Image (cartoon, rainbow, N blue to C red):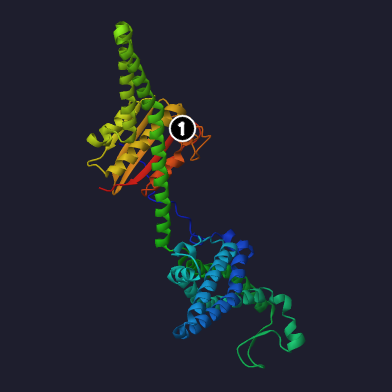
Amino acid sequence: MGTTATASGPPQPRQAGLRPPGVAEILRAPFSGRTWGELLYVLSSFPISLAAFVFTLTTGSVGIGLLITFVGLPILAAGLSCCRAFGRMERARARLLLGHDVAEPEPVRALQRGTGVLAWTGALFRSGVSWRSALYSLLHFPWAVFQFVLATVLWVDALGLLLYPAWQWVFPEYLDQPGIQLGGDGHTGFFVDSPPEIAVASAVGLVLLLVSPWVLRGTTQVDRLMVTGLLGPSKLATRVWELESDRGVVVDTAAADLRRIERDLHDGAQARLVALAMGLGLAKEKLLEDPEAAAAMVDEAHGEVKLALQELRDLARGIHPAILTDRGLGPALSAIATRCTVPVRVTVDLHQRPAQAIEGITYFTVSELLQNISKHAHATHATVDVWRSDNRLMLQVTDNGQGGATTSLHNSPSGTGGTGLAGLADRLHSVDGLLVLDSPHNGPTTVTAELPWRD
């Protein structure tokens, strides 16, 4: 059985600055918008970081010193609140000038255990974002000073030397010197005044000008790391949010399934059983007066019982098929493949069974995809492959239909998108799974899913 390589997680963004630059890129770098944005970020960091450093150090020192009088607590709370506001501004500044987008961390209200000022203050102190924002204010200042000095020296020297031929006349005209002095005192030393020396100085300035953007780009990588690590959401908080979101998806899915079961029972088996009870009541009344008519009614009721039993079996299979519980994924998937309107080849390469929940999700995912192929894909054949890769259960469903499927819930030309591929992705994501769609126009369509194995 062939396998298809899939990503084990969401694709990671390409890190800027890691690719070796070309000659054209080096020549364009001093004039690019990115360079000027980074330069503006570095130059503005010095006064902003200075103000944040002084404020954080002052409020922290005063607040801790006055804790014994209980006056320090509101001072510390105000300082931490301002540090969080400073963090929001820094994330916005990094997003605007560095093109570095960092997600917002959890708000204070997410940690509140009640209402009122005291609950808010307690949540503020419990929040790791508050303390990491204060730490950022203290650590970023010395780095901002270093960056400011480095960028200022580089760019001033680069532009000054590059344009030296244009302003070299200032020295003999106003300073009584032939040119820039290198070494010595005010009267002796080496002066850059001859045309070759001026040309060399200008060339050095050009080299510095071409190098400066890349030095700047390297230093701002540190800023990106600091903003992400100290001002962004923590991995633990992000995971908690994901679990809360997944829990909501599971609850909504379970509620939708319950509504579907209730609707199927009400409109199907329940209605048929009500009609059956009425028919048997009429047959009972006619049993003595017209035995033949009563027998016909009983015969009709017998047919209704068979239909009701079939509907109940189908409903039970939709809740959790017995064949899946008793025999596993291989026979269960082969059984639903026989109900598809196109020929389906099923290959299951599993030496042991995964957790029941994973089996169930895999079964219903394949069932949904095969239903979509039957209804919308206009395919002539399909394949279902299931195998294990390390601690992941891999699933791939392929058809040779018209393609063009999307992850939208509606208006998809292929079945996988039209009946809710986004819903399938949410269901898989709720158990740390992943769904990948490849559906070019004119086909084929391939849906690949990864689920945790969980023995």
Residue beneath the point at 53% across and 34% down: 411
Label 1 sits on residue:
415
Q: Is residue 194 left or right of residue 117?
A: right
Residue type marked 1: Gly
Where residue 380 appears, as percent x and y from the top left, is 41, 25
**Residue 22, percent from left and from top:** 54, 59
Asked which quadrant contains residue 164, the reply is bottom right
Compare residues 57 and 373 and report the one nearer the observer. 57
Q: Toward the viewer: 242 or 202?
A: 242
Q: Is residue 215 visible?
A: no
Is residue 220 toward the left or the right of residue 279 in the image?
right
Left or right? Give the position of 453 relative to 131.
Answer: left
Question: In the rendering, at what x and y percent does residue 314 appear?
Answer: 33, 28
Residue 92 percent across, percent down from the top left: 57, 64
Residues 120 and 87: in front is 120
Identity of the residue drawn at 58% across and 70% down: 212
Q: Secondary structure at mark 1?
A: helix
Q: Is residue 359 visible?
A: yes
| Neighbour tally class for label 1: few under 14, some 14-19, many 20 plus, Cα within 10 Å | many
Of residues 136 and 17, which is closer to you in this image?
Answer: 136
Eyeballing the image, is 296 above or below 321? above
The residue located at (59%, 64%) in the rendering is 97
**Quadrant including the N terminus:** top left
Q: Residue at x 64, y 76 (%)?
A: 156
